[in-house]
Image (spheres, rainbow, N blue to C red):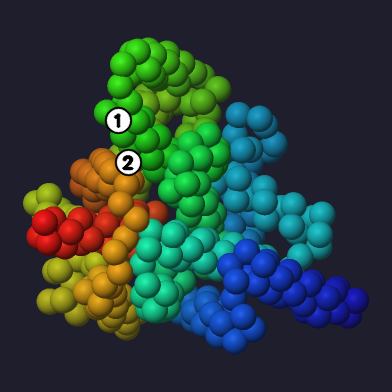
Amino acid sequence: MLNALYNYIIIFFVLLILTRDLSQKYFKLNNKEFILSLSYHLFLTLFFWYLFINQPADYKQYLELKHIKEFSFSHSFATTEIVYNFIKILRNLFSFNDFNIILSFSLISYFGILIFLKNILKLGVEKKIAYILFLLPGIHLWTSLPGKDCLILFFLSCFFYMYIDKKFFFSILFVIPVLLIRPQIGVVFLLSIGITEFFLIKGYKKILIFTVSLIIFYLILNSTFASGYLTSKTIFSDNFILQMLGKVSELSLKYSQSDSAYEINNLVLNIFNYLVFPIDYIFKNNSMIINLTILLESFTLLLLVSAIIIQRNSLKSDKRLIYFLCTCSLIYLMILPQALFNFGLNLRQKWMIIPFLIYLSFLLKDFIVKTNKM
């Protein structure tokens, strides 16, 4: 009885009041905007939970602490162990039940989405476009339950918020957790930042940056401690980069046998299948969940295209942002969509790159419009 009172009344309302205060202070939401936005997000969280209530799902394993390992510095602060240990702290230290753990992760996702929209506004996009983008069902659904995805969405949104303001050091700090949680994503962003800065700087600084980058790359490549962040040391070797590639290969093989696996196609179709949904699913006799998901993804695509077309404001022009977004998008889309062919996995992972593709789409449209007016 006391535990139910603590979790369903005290903790629940404390989390909601804290969320309200933060959203009003840092995101300038009035009461109506806060209530409507949070209600929409929590409704989709509940819908996702209900959709998979009788189906296998990763969030259930996290809640059960099913595969948690004994504490060690080389494993407990990396990949799935970060999520497991975060849940363990919430459960053991604060006595959270499953309901409040799910709510906590959902609220992290909520703030990640708000920061993403704040980034959109900082670029100069109209506020009504931000409202449309908030309605994207996919970003709420697939990042709201316990797992890596809500954490990465939050950290990458914070990263770009700092990167827009040219706070280089602080932006890098937010990429580090991404590197620990999903190394392949973190490497893509660090590499993109390095390439962008290398081509923009001039003179002796370029040689200095190049030399420092080589040293850092060498240390990462040969770091046994860093290699523990990925998988066990039996995969290939202790080499960090080889283990990262091995992990991507392992994921590809692991999910290729599941019910939501799809066929490998050419480069362009692989990207479309990854970002939207596998085209061959249209002609298959799919389950109700897959058909409903395809419908939601189609609605998401329609909203995105509409938002880009409607946008009319002149945006904040910064060649560094365009270079970075082009580099990041190119590297990401040349690797992950060509390695992972599982609809269920990609539904969640693609929201690591889609916000950056949205940023890039608005900036490129603005650049084209300005060029045509010259």
Quarter of the figure with residue 132: bottom left
Circle 1 SS class: helix
Q: Eyeballing the image, is 266 above or below 96?
A: above
Report x, y in % for residue 113. 49, 65
Report x, y in % for residue 114. 52, 66
Picture residue at 52% right of the left edge, 51% below the top: 158
Comparing 244 with 363, the one in front is: 363
Q: Is mark 2 in CB contact (under 8 Å) with mark 1?
A: yes
Circle 1 residues within 10 Å: few <14, some 14–19, many ≥20: few
Comparing 129 with 339, the one in front is: 129
Of the numbered discs 2 and 1, the one sitting upstream in the chain is: 1
Report x, y in % for residue 36. 55, 85
Comparing 287 with 4, the one in front is: 4
244 left or right of 53?
Answer: left
Specify the farthest residue to the front: 374
Distance in Å between CA atoms under marks 2 and 1: 7 Å
Kind of residue at badge 1 = Leu
Quarter of the figure with residue 358: bottom left
Residue of label 1: 200
Circle 2 SS class: helix
Labelled disc at residue 320: 2
294 left or right of 239?
Answer: left
- Whether residue 184 is visible: no
343 left or right of 6?
Answer: left
- Whether residue 129 is visible: yes
Quarter of the figure with residue 138: bottom left
Picture residue at 42% right of the left edge, 74% below the top: 127
Picture residue at 78% right of the left edge, 72% below the top: 14
Picture residue at 37% right of the left edge, 26% below the top: 241
Kind of residue at badge 2 = Arg
